[in-house]
């Protein structure tokens, strides 16, 4: 797929606050954007390695907590009369901490879970998220438990000529989320269109054959989990500083399910799938809020999901791609699609 | 035969569940040879391949490749050491195009890791261009370049078999193990397959072949190892094997014309 339509889309989204300065719409788009980032990260695992992580909210929540704790600072006992103290840090440090902590846990989980794949991986990821939720609920000294971490500062950016600017305005947060989303999209795209991405797809398509041509299973699956977890952590950090409060519910199963639905309806294993699915399932519930009672809405979504899975089992993006004339990369062309079109 | 062998299989025994799939297997392959491993159905040929390439652990014995013991190593490590196999049941990346298949099979010919992929540094770009060239060269070599954009699963059966060989040969392994490359092919496809194996050998690849088409085995092999019920019953050049009474008995209870009996396995 050529990059031109993609950049046009980004430009249109960037111009939106100027054309349509509707605060409600912007805040809905911002939170949809945060979940789209989560869906992009999930897609790297689910779509390109074929491993279903049903605990993806774990990385999202880890990022949210890491970022919140770094920016609030903490002072906790760690046994033996020792204390671990961190003075409050700027939010961007929290953002990096979120990526690092989530990525680190991704590495751990990858090392453990990829010895067992398929159903076992699914189960381990579910347990992982549940355990983290329990920790967040019960380690009150660190997390305030169910009372939640409150009073988080908004994101701040250093802008030339203006110094550090706190992003209180809705349109500023919106642009920040858009920027991070574009960056995460590009990270996944670079990986997918590389030797690493081909190794992931090869493992997904035929692991026995992939190993026979020298592709190291654990190595590549761990790479994918770490990157995926890191991006989910970034989304969690954005989430935390957007709503300015973090409670143990960030680990809830429903967040994972939301991301899974976004990826599957949009088209797993396609770069644009999570974006398309994320826009639909991120925006519809809020935009239809006035139009129909929630119960009716949920029934409508259920029916829509079932119809989508029945008629577009590979998702929306592959279905649209199938309608367009196939591009044939000629010999000597520098870019060729890595099996993006494969479901 | 004074040079140390490229591959030596030493007293390998394999048990699958309660069944002894290989009782005692020893043979060697020297650099540059085409060696065929033949035997009736269930003799243990595929099992031997699985042991050599790390997909199965033998109960006993050693497999040495350039002096290094392979037992206990993972298939991907063994492939990286220069020993790659093809599969008896057609094994391709079905939903990917033929060209993508070739690029995936060239994994070992590249080095780009996560950082190189993310930053697209000049070295990574150059490598990507080179791998692309090599993929085309491989497809030309096996005559599938015209099918480059076709999903592998839509290829004709014979083409899929050829792609399977191409995937194994792509990264130019020193030793190529082919498990019944001609299975299910018609006579003209079989001839093409044989020509392809010869060209691989001429390129400097040593080949260990499992094949039921005896006409092909007799014409292409430098040496033949005959396996029956998990044991070697004969080994030597084709002319010797053809006359070996044990071999004839194992194949058809001594009746003449045994070479055609398994041609359609
Ligand atoms: N995964 C397995 N589980 C159980 N038994 C197996 C398995 N693989 C092989 N066997 C048994 O081991 C023996 C050797 O099988 P193998 O596949 O190596 O034979 P082969 O020589 O390749 O035969 P063919 O010519 O039919 O391919 C057979 O008796 C077979 O039934
Ligand atoms: Mg076999």
Image (cartoon, coloured by chain):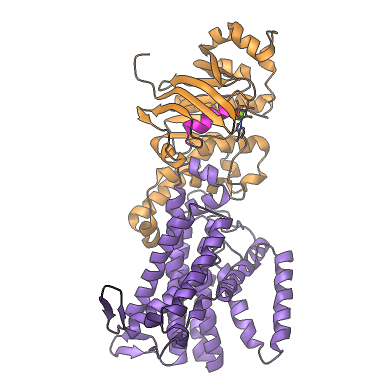
| Viewer-nearest residue: B66 or A191 | B66
Q: Position of residue A174 (x, y in %)?
A: 47, 85
Ligand 2 sits in quadrant: top right
| Viewer-nearest residue: A191 or A10 | A191
| Viewer-nearest residue: A330 or B251 | B251
- Letter of the chain in purple: A
Residue B190 in the image: above or below residue B122: above
Dominant secondary structure (helix, strand or loop) of the stretch shown in magenta: helix
Residue B172 in the image: above or below residue A62: above
Q: Which residues are magenta?
A: B45-55
Q: Position of residue B99 (x, y in %)?
A: 54, 47
Position of residue B102 in the picture relative to residue A89 (left or right): right
Position of residue A5 in the picture relative to residue A150 (left or right): right
- Letter of the chain in orange: B
Q: Quadrant of residue B196?
A: top right
Q: Is residue A28 visible?
A: yes
Q: Position of residue A79 (x, y in %)?
A: 30, 73
Question: Looking at the rendering, in which quadrant would you find the N terminus of chain A?
Answer: bottom right
């Amino acid at each position: 797929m050529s990059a031109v339509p993609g950049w046009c889309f980004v430009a249109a989204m960037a111009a939106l606050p100027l054309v349509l300065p509707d605060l409600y719409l912007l805040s809905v788009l911002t939170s949809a954007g945060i979940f789209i980032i989560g869906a992009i990260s999930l897609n790297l695992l689910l779509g390109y390695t074929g491993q279903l992580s049903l605990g993806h909210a774990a990385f999202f929540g880890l990022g949210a907590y890491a970022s919140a704790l770094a920016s609030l600072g903490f002072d906790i006992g760690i046994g033996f009369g020792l204390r671990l103290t961190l003075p409050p840090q700027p939010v961007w440090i929290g953002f990096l901490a979120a990526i690092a902590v989530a990525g680190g846990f991704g590495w751990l989980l990858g090392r453990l879970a990829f010895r067992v794949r398929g159903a076992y991986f699914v189960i381990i990821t579910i347990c992982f998220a549940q355990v983290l939720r329990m920790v967040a609920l019960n380690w009150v000294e660190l997390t305030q438990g169910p009372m939640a971490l409150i009073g988080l500062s908004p994101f701040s950016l250093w802008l030339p000529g203006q110094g550090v600017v706190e992003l209180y305005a809705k349109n500023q947060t919106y642009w920040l989320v858009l920027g991070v989303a574009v960056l995460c999209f590009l990270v996944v795209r670079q990986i997918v269109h590389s030797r690493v991405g081909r190794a992931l797809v090869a493992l997904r398509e035929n692991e026995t054959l992939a190993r026979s041509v020298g592709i190291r299973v654990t190595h590549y699956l761990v790479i994918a989990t770490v990157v995926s977890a890191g991006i989910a952590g970034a989304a969690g950090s954005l989430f935390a500083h957007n709503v300015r409060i973090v409670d143990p519910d960030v680990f809830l199963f429903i967040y994972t399910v939301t991301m899974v639905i976004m990826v599957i309806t949009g088209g797993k294993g396609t770069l644009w799938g999570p974006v398309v699915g994320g826009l639909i399932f991120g925006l519809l519930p809020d935009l239809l809020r006035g139009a129909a009672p929630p119960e009716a809405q949920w029934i409508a979504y259920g029916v829509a999901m079932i119809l989508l899975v029945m008629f577009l089992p590979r998702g929306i993006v592959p279905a649209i791609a199938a309608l367009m004339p196939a591009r044939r990369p000629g010999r000597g062309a520098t870019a060729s699609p890595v099996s993006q079109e494969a479901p | 035969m004074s040079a140390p062998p490229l591959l030596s299989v030493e007293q390998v025994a394999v048990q699958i569940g309660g069944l002894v799939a290989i009782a005692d297997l020893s043979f060697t392959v020297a650099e540059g040879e085409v060696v065929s491993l033949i035997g009736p159905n269930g003799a243990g040929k595929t099992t031997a391949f699985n042991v050599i390439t790390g997909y199965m652990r033998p109960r006993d014995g050693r497999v040495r490749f350039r002096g290094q013991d392979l037992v206990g190593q993972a298939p991907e490590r063994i492939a990286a050491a220069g020993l790659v196999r093809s599969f008896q049941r057609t094994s391709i990346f079905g939903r990917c195009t033929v060209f993508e298949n070739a690029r995936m099979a060239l994994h070992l010919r590249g080095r780009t890791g996560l950082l190189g992929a993310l930053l697209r540094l000049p070295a990574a770009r150059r490598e990507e261009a080179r791998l692309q060239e090599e993929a085309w060269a491989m497809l030309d070599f096996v005559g599938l370049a015209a099918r480059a954009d076709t999903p592998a699963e839509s290829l004709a059966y014979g083409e899929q078999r050829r792609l399977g060989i191409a995937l194994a040969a792509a990264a130019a392994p020193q030793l190529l193990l082919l498990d019944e490359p001609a299975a299910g092919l018609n006579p003209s496809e079989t001839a093409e397959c044989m020509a392809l194996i010869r060209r691989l050998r001429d390129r400097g690849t040593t080949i260990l072949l499992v094949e039921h088409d005896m006409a092909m085995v007799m014409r292409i092999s430098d040496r033949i190892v005959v396996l029956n019920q998990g044991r070697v019953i004969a080994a030597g050049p084709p002319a010797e094997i053809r006359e070996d009474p044990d071999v004839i008995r194992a194949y058809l209870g001594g009746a003449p014309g045994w070479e055609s009996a398994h041609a359609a396995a």
